[in-house]
Amino acid sequence: MKQILFILVTLALMGCKRNNQTKQLAQSEISQMKPLVEKPTIHVALLLDTSNSMDGLIDQAKAQLWSMVNELSLAKFKDLKPSLKIAIYEYGNDQLDVKNGYIRQVMPFNSDLDDISNNLFSLTTNGGNEFCGQVISTSTRELGWGKENNDLNLIFIAGNEPFTQGPIPFQQASLNAKEKKITINTIYCGDYQEGINSYWEEGANLTHGTYMAINQNNETHYASTPFDDDILKLNEKLNETYITYGQKGQEKKLMQHEQDDKAASIGKTNAVTRSISKSSYLYDNSTWDLVDAIKNQTIDLQNLNKDDLPKELKTKSKTEIETYLNEKAEERAQINKEIQSINQKRMEYLKSHQKENTTELQSVMINSIKKQAALKNYEWENNQ
């Protein structure tokens, strides 16, 4: 009887041990499946005054978008590369609906860089009333702001009228933004002290943001470099690696070329900075390009309808298509690597030939983003 009891107790203990080991293994597997740190997102909402006097501001935004994207592509958080989403509002234009406070959402948060460029180029100016508190309140309410601890939620509002105008007090709008962990940064287009007197500084201070002043009528000046032509030639080759799919594929590829042309219309160097942006991880066209879509696993090639394929792939087998796309992916990766390598030499050249203009829109925005990102332990590669 004692022997039987001993055997039963031993078997029970062995069973408990196995159960504990199984639980530990399961917990270990779960911990391996879960990322230790969630990939962060930088949300930037641009609230741009498009009243009559703001032509210079809009021109700067168009001219400096790609330089800003290139700088943000160097951000990292604990070895993770953050996503970037940009939203655009215009306000103060009397062609807009008075019932909405002369405010229009031009674009909700979007990571499609060609869409962002296209929407910026669509902006025009006209006289109107500039209601800063109301446009902040509207963007705070309407946009899908980040909710993770490591996300950056930033508003940049630019204009040149008193911050106190409109039916919604900026103090109340700032309080609502702060509750959503949104930092408001204000950019007064004019004299620094005049902006302070017009409450633009207080508008930033309420959410611990940054107050800045720029001369919106300054033209964007770039120094050309001996490396520009090489980058532009590589950009032409890069465009040839994009393979469309779906109903909007051809339309989006056409937009890609249009945004190249719009960047070039501002100046050769702006076309170069756009080409560099296109070689970065932030330039993702998974919604219309098969190479990006397969890389990011947004489609399954095996289930793709032949009607969604471009003409040159319709008669190919699945294996032939896969081989073709792999070749294009390798070609693109090599071109991107070459552009980034040449850009390193270009940046070294610019350091010794061009002084930073601290009164330009892109410059003050990047300085502000870096300052606020540092509070959340973001870092910059090749930090200067």
Image (cartoon, helix red, strand yellow):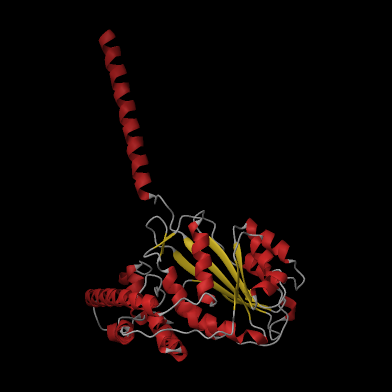
What residue occupies the far top of the structure in this picture? Answer: 1
Q: Give the x, y percent position of residue 126.
A: 67, 88
In the picture, the quarter occupied by the C terminus is bottom left
Specify the quadrant of the image occupied by residue 291: bottom left
Residue 256 visible somewhere in the drawing? no
Q: Nearer the viewer, residue 67 or 317?
A: 67
- Left or right relative to 49: residue 224: left
Specify the quadrant of the image occupied by residue 237: bottom left
**Residue drawn at 28 percent across, 82 percent down:** 313
Residue 54 visible somewhere in the drawing? yes
18 is higher (above) or lower (below) than 118: above
32 is higher (above) or lower (below) than 176: above
- Left or right relative to 221: residue 325: left
Q: Give the x, y percent position of residue 133.
A: 70, 69
224 is higher (above) or lower (below) than 43: below
Specify the quadrant of the image occupied by residue 304: bottom left
**Residue drawn at 22 percent across, 77 percent down:** 320
Q: Nearer the viewer, residue 270 or 304?
A: 270
Q: Give the x, y percent position of residue 155.
A: 59, 67
- Left or right relative to 180: residue 255: left
- Left or right relative to 145: residue 201: right
